[in-house]
Image (tube, rainbow, N blue to C red):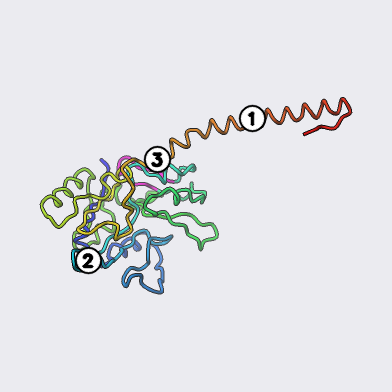
Amino acid sequence: MPKGVLVDITKCIGCKACQVACKQWNDLPANGTPEFVNGLTSPAETDGYTYTNVRIEVVKKGDDYTMRSAKRQCMHCEYPACASACFAKALQRDPKTGAVHYYPHLCVGCRYCMLACPFDIPKYQWDKQFPLISKCQFCFDPEGKYDRLGYGMAPACVDSCPTGALKFGERDELLKEAWSRINSDPKYLKQVLGEKEAGGTSWLYISDVPFENFGFRPNLGTRPLPEYSHNFLKWTPIIAVGWGTLLTVLYHYSKRREQIAKESGKDVQM
């Protein structure tokens, strides 16, 4: 069954152990960020060399202000818009784990996935001579050497969390636990982010403050985003064939007029 991770924002202390563990496991370089954003968030968001990012915000709760932290990474959608937009098949969802895998050797660098993703996750390695996109792989290795989920292990970020803010397991069971926590404690919002948004995601969030504080879009809806692109792109072959046929007809019509004009010794009037 598809896997998932439950993120309990009320338990996150912003220690960034998950961020460091991700860097170490994926052998990613440090960013050398010159300054923090909003005081503590560094880097400001995921980038070509940062697959996971802990966003720390001061939020209003009732009449008071408090600090909350939330881990951001690829949501590993049930119906990934990035994979739907990728004509090179460099992005593919594994139905067994639910992870959306990226295969660099298939990528052509078109960046359609960056435009399609509703969570603004795929990032471009702008500083490379032959840049590719990058994102969280759910600790999957395209070469098959370091596939944590394949060996029955939790993602590196989950194993590093000291407070239990991240819990790995089967998505269906995590949903049950999320709603159990929500229904047993009034501090939580009556929402599991990722349960239905954009068709559902492998990463699920519960919180006591609005998710918009951490950059999540509130208006995604529940319809899988590839359905929108399918309704548009399904006409592409018809349009391509029709347009090609029209141009072919016009070409032969123009050539025929030119031939008739030459035979009659007259100029063609276009």
Residue position for label 1: 246
Q: Of all residues shown, which one is farthest toward the left?
A: 184
Secondary structure under tag 2 reads loop
Q: Residue at x 48, y 59 (%)?
A: 125
Query: Considering only order in the chain, which callout, 2 or 1, is on the residue closer to the N terminus?
Result: 2
Judge the density around disc 2: few (<14), some (14-19), many (≥20) Cα neighbours within 10 Å.
Answer: some
Judge the density around disc 3: few (<14), some (14-19), many (≥20) Cα neighbours within 10 Å.
Answer: many
Q: Position of residue 261 (x, y in %)?
A: 84, 28
Q: Is residue 204 magenta?
A: no
Which disc number belongs to residue 159? none
Q: Is residue 236 above or below residue 148?
A: above
Q: Is residue 211 above or below residue 31?
A: above
Query: Considering only order in the chain, which callout, 1 or 3, is on the residue closer to the N terminus?
Result: 3
Residue position for label 3: 226
Gap between marks 1 and 2, in whole Å?
A: 63 Å
Q: Position of residue 210 (x, y in %)?
A: 25, 57
Task: Name the residue nearer the viewer: 232 or 266.
Answer: 266
